């Protein structure tokens, strides 16, 4: 990548980020489910192994070897339905079940997070996680990785709605002065209950006003924000109770995530995008998603060739290196052809044209080669032609 930066193929002004799934190299026969009924059996085995020094204590007294009852239970109502068992592969237990679309079944996979420059589609950074990792949470690390590699501050960053988190808008993009070209997630317009967008949030006084004009105060802190709860006496006589309050609740609660005001600004700005902003987002679709398609169709990244997170990460790094080398080789050969045309050497220009055509045919066999083979092939080719 540094060679691409030195050649002027990277601007660093506009960066496109996206994530894609890589099918793990496992068989469906190796999939097994972790059922919740294993937990009581394991607890019973631990109870049988209690040291004899605790035998003289009264029954039911927790010991140092036994955890406190309900010590890790989360506050709130208990779950009505038990958690569905998670499936994992016995040959590659790190791979997790995930899917890219709701109408497709889950598959054991890893996830590749890619940042691509807008100028010449150079890959600026890649990272590999498990398939269930949220790409929105990986955005701060991706931004820091790209700015460290290029030494420039990102001016415009594009992404799909998977990155539309309030924390991304507020903590990592607005604070850095980076324009976030990320469409917010759609708000349901025909909800059965009154949606949260009907409630007015006042960040100055830390209150929320319901559609009836009543004030909702902060109730409790969650991992991502605050819960605002109305008074039961206000909801009891409210004419909107049937449309607002659930049947099993006494009052309405609203969850306000951290950076919610930045998310509201992003929703308003979405309807005021100018032509330049719309063009950058259109380029996002075919640039970074095209890079993922090229990696899967021409470099075999649709499915992992090794097992384990580290081995899949090596495959991702080699694929990105081979793709950047192909772009760098093509640029240098075009540069040589342009120099010949500028000097007025018609014979050499014809030779350069023939060489450029030969290079196009020579690089095409890389589509069916492995990652390490592609890197060695390109290195030998560039050294033989003097391109590098």
Image: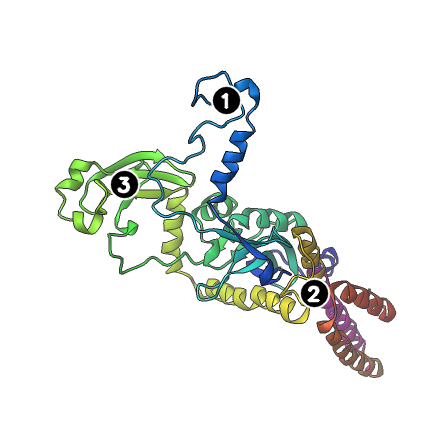
- What's the distance in space between the residues labelled 2 and 3, CA to CA? 51 Å
Of residues 175 and 222, the one nearer the viewer is 222
Q: Which residue is mark 1?
A: 63
| CB contact under 8 Å: marks 2 and 3 | no
Mark 1 Cα shell of 10 Å, populated few (<14), some (14-19), many (≥20): few
- Per the image, label 1 sits on a secondary structure element best described as loop
Would you say the magenta stretch is mainly helix, strand or loop?
helix
Q: Earlier in the sequence, mark 2 or mark 1?
A: 1
Disc number for residue 208:
3
Q: Earlier in the sequence, mark 1 or mark 3?
A: 1
Percent across and percent down for residue 121 are 63, 64
Percent across and percent down for residue 387 are 82, 68
Disc number for residue 323:
2
- Per the image, label 3 sits on a secondary structure element best described as strand
- What's the distance in space between the residues labelled 2 and 1, CA to CA? 59 Å
Of residues 134 and 204, the one nearer the viewer is 134
Residue drawn at (34%, 46%) of the image? 80
Q: Earlier in the sequence, mark 2 or mark 3?
A: 3
Boundaries of the magenta span? 320-346
Residue drawn at (49%, 28%) of the image? 67
- What's the distance in space between the residues labelled 1 and 3, CA to CA? 46 Å
In the image: residue 136, left or right of residue 270: right
- Per the image, label 2 sits on a secondary structure element best described as helix
Which image quarter is the N terminus in?
bottom right
Mark 2 Cα shell of 10 Å, populated few (<14), some (14-19), many (≥20): many
| CB contact under 8 Å: marks 1 and 3 | no
Percent across and percent down for residue 245 are 22, 46
Residue 198 makes an appearance in the image: yes
Of residues 236 and 8, the one nearer the viewer is 236
- Looking at the image, residue 282 lies above or below residue 131: below
């Amino acid at each position: 990548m540094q060679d691409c930066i030195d050649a002027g193929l990277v601007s660093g002004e506009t960066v496109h980020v996206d994530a894609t799934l890589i099918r793990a190299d496992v068989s469906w026969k190796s999939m097994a489910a972790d059922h919740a009924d294993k937990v009581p059996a394991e607890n019973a085995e631990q109870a049988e192994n209690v040291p004899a020094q605790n035998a003289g204590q009264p029954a039911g007294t927790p010991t140092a070897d036994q955890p406190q009852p309900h010590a890790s239970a989360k506050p709130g109502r208990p779950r009505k339905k038990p958690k569905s068992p998670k499936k994992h592969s016995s040959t590659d237990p790190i791979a997790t079940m995930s899917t890219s679309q709701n109408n497709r079944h889950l598959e054991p996979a890893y996830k590749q997070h890619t940042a691509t420059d807008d100028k010449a589609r150079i890959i600026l950074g890649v990272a590999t996680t498990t398939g269930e990792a949220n790409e929105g949470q990986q955005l701060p690390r991706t931004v820091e990785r790209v700015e460290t590699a290029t030494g420039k501050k990102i001016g415009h960053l594009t992404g799909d709605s998977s990155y539309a988190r309030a924390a991304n808008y507020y903590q990592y993009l607005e604070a850095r002065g980076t324009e976030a070209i990320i469409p917010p997630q759609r708000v349901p317009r025909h909800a059965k209950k009154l949606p949260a967008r009907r409630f007015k949030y006042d960040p100055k006084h830390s209150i929320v006003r319901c559609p009836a004009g009543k004030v909702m105060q902060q109730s409790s802190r969650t991992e991502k924000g605050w819960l605002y709860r109305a008074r039961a006496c206000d909801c009891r006589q409210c004419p909107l109770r049937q449309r607002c309050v659930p049947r099993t609740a006494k009052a309405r609660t609203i969850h306000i995530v951290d950076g919610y005001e930045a998310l509201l600004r992003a929703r308003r700005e979405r309807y005021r995008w100018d032509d330049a902003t719309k063009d950058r987002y259109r380029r996002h679709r075919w640039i970074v998603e095209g890079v993922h398609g090229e990696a899967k169709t021409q470099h075999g990244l649709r499915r992992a060739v090794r097992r384990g997170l580290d081995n899949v990460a090596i495959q991702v790094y080699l694929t990105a290196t081979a793709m950047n080398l192909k772009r760098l080789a093509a640029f240098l050969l075009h540069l040589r052809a342009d120099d010949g045309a500028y000097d007025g050497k018609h014979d050499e220009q014809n030779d350069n044209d023939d060489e450029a055509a030969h290079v196009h045919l020579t690089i095409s066999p890389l589509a069916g080669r492995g990652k390490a083979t592609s890197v060695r092939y390109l290195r030998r080719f560039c050294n033989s032609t003097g391109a590098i």
